Image (cartoon, grey):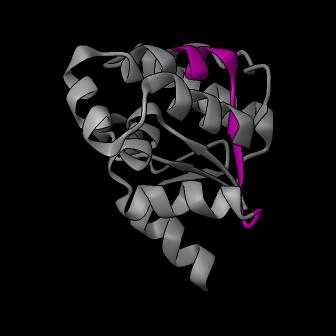
Amino acid sequence: MRLVLDTNTAVSGLLWGGVPGQLIDAAAAGRVKLIASLPLLDELHSVLHRKKFAGHMAEQGTAAGVLFEGYAALVQLVVPTDIGPVILADPDDDMVLATAVAGGADAIVSGDAHLLAIVAFRGIPVITSAAAVSRLVA
């Protein structure tokens, strides 16, 4: 299964594990292929380096750079497709869609209300982490 994780899902999985973390673990085990683009990786890098996460990372004995490099090593990089404006309420979400189209994703994994509200884009479903994990098990 080829998945694009939105930044919040990737951050959640990297920092707290849980269900999003299961998707990252599945990618590390070769059961899932994660797709990303440079703009999505840039956003992830920026978010992981926010001061509000430093304490949690220190408690876990890790650092933003380590988490970022580990994630970046798992993803297949693609150049986002030009899709034009889609999510007017949050244009940054368009990059997730553009990356998914370019990478031939089987699903977009997100907890973002704007993305989930569109249900699917160009035949690519937008699903929660829990739905993605249940598809892995099925």
Residue extending farthest bottom: 138
Give the magenta range.
30-42
Q: Position of residue 113 (x, y in %)?
A: 29, 40
Quadrant for residue 92, please give it: top left
In the rendered view, tell whether residue 61 sits above or below residue 29. Answer: above
In the rendered view, tell whether residue 85 sits above or below residue 75. Answer: above
7 left or right of 41 in image: left
Quadrant for residue 137, please give it: bottom right
Where, quadrant-wise, is the C terminus in this rendering? bottom right
Q: Nearer the viewer, residue 62 or 9?
A: 62
Q: Position of residue 18 (x, y in %)?
A: 35, 62
Q: Answer yes or no: is residue 86 visible.
A: no
Residue at x 43% of width, y 28% of height? 63
Residue at x 29% of width, y 33% of height? 58
Q: Nearer the viewer, residue 89 or 16?
A: 16
Residue at x 33% of width, y 39% of height? 112
3 left or right of 129 in image: right
In the rendered view, tell whether residue 95 sits above or below residue 112. Answer: above
Q: Is residue 32 magenta?
A: yes
Q: Answer yes or no: is residue 98 visible.
A: yes
Q: Position of residue 60 (x, y in %)?
A: 32, 44
Instruction: Count all numbered tags in the image, as a single digit.
Output: 0
Residue at x 67% of width, y 29% of height? 99
Where, quadrant-wise, is the N terminus in this rendering? bottom right
10 left or right of 122 in image: left
Q: Is residue 63 magenta?
A: no
Quadrant for residue 15, please give it: top left
